[in-house]
Amino acid sequence: MSDETYLKLRDFLNQFPLGFPETSSQVELKILKRLFNEEEAEIAIVLTHIPEEAQKIAKRIEMDVKYLEEKLELMAKKGLIFRMKRDNKTLFNAIPFMIGLYEYSVKKVDKELAKYYKEYYDAAYQDEMGLSNVPGFKVVPIEETIEPNTTLYPYHKLKESIKNARVISVTDCICRKEAKLNGEGCDYPIETCLSFGVAAEYYIENGIGREITADEAIKIIEQADEAGLVHAGANSKHLSNICNCCPCCCGSMKGITKKGLDKHKFMNAMFESIIDEEICINCGTCVERCPVGAIEMENIAVVSRKKCLGCGLCATACPEDAITLQLREDGEEPFNRVMEMGLAILKGKRENLN
């Protein structure tokens, strides 16, 4: 098996906002060889990030359209490219390593691939995720934790957004599954990765996830909240996914909790926890509950704004209802679309590399 095609594929993937940088060990090539055969790698390279019909792709690369369409369908089934249906047309496009190849391998990841993923994350990908200083995720608490009478936009309302979703899927958390396979991990719930709309259709059609109702999705959110997981989705106003993240396995959370990196490299905290001094009984429940160590006990619980994710986990656990969430006055709005976020990440990376 020649490395030439996989080197080209690595360089191709490295052009995405969240790229696929080279490492000294070349473990990234081991990942690609596990995911793609050589022909699949050659096909992936000629795709673009813009969805296209097989006929247009075949014409560009001078390949038989029927043969190419069969290959593209198989690659979509394997989670190697994205496929969507729009206006009775089937469209295909290339996907990045994250969010993409990594997440779509959730049903086929084994000990060997998990080992490669961990090695690659430690060697290069954590740095890649934080390089732009543009957070790829926004934190969305459940509505019950938010200060009453707060004026909220639709993208602030997690449960309402779920109810309005056209189609919903759930699958296992790839981060926790990878950690378990590496002999690490945690006991948090694992079937918690939610997708919506076109993304959900992709998961369902390719057997990567299963279709669920809005009520089932909300129940998963509530159970995840009770367990102590942070609700985070792509940092855009459009709801495409919700990860329920743990502090020990999540690729973004680990950068904060294990490496002490600034949360803004990974997470857009739209809210912050506010403690009512007159109600707080200094019980310490919130200190134990906070996934990022943002609360300390003095005479009362004190929140570090710099660390606080605005996830609301402290508020749902407070026995006295002494904690509510408020929108940050200096908060950042999510991007209008994922593509806008991608352009900002590319710009941030260029600035920080120069």
Image (tube, rainbow, N blue to C red):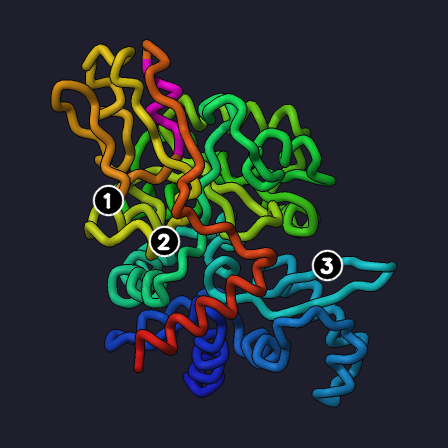
- Amino acid type of the residue that numbered disc 3 sits on in the rendered structure: Met
Q: Which of marks 3 and 1 is nearer the N terminus?
A: 3
Q: Which residue is drawn at 47% across and 42% down?
A: 243
Instruction: Tell me if label 3 and label 1 are in contact, CB under 8 Å.
Output: no
**2 vs 3, front mark:** 2
Name the residue type under label 1: Thr
Q: Mark 1 points at which residue?
A: 257
Which residue does the image show at 63% across and 31% down from the upper left? Answer: 160
Q: Is residue 312 magenta?
A: yes
Sequence-wise, the earlier of marks 2 and 3 is 3
* Type of amino acid at the residue the image marks with label 2: Phe
Assign the magenta stretch its main secondary structure. helix
| Residue farthest bottom in this picture | 62
Q: What stretch is highlighted in magenta?
A: 311-318
**Quick one: label 3, few (<14), some, or many (20+) residues within 10 Å?**
some
Distance, label 2 to label 3, CA atoms, is 28 Å
Residue 269 in view of the camera: yes
Q: How far apart are marks 3 and 1 (CA)?
A: 36 Å
Residue at disc 3, secondary structure: strand
Task: From this view, report whether residue 240 is shown above or below residue 304.
Answer: below
**Residue holding disc 2:** 266
The spot of residue 167 in percent (x, y) is: 71, 40
Residue 223 in sight here:
no
Q: Which of marks 2 and 1 is nearer the N terminus?
A: 1
Q: Is residue 242 above or below residue 40?
A: above
**Pick the front one: 328 or 36:** 328
At x 62% / y 81%, what residue is drawn? 46
Residue 86 point in image, percent of width and height: 80, 59
- Badge 1 local density, few (<14 within 10 Å), some, or many (20+)? some
Left or right: where 143 falls relative to 206 = left
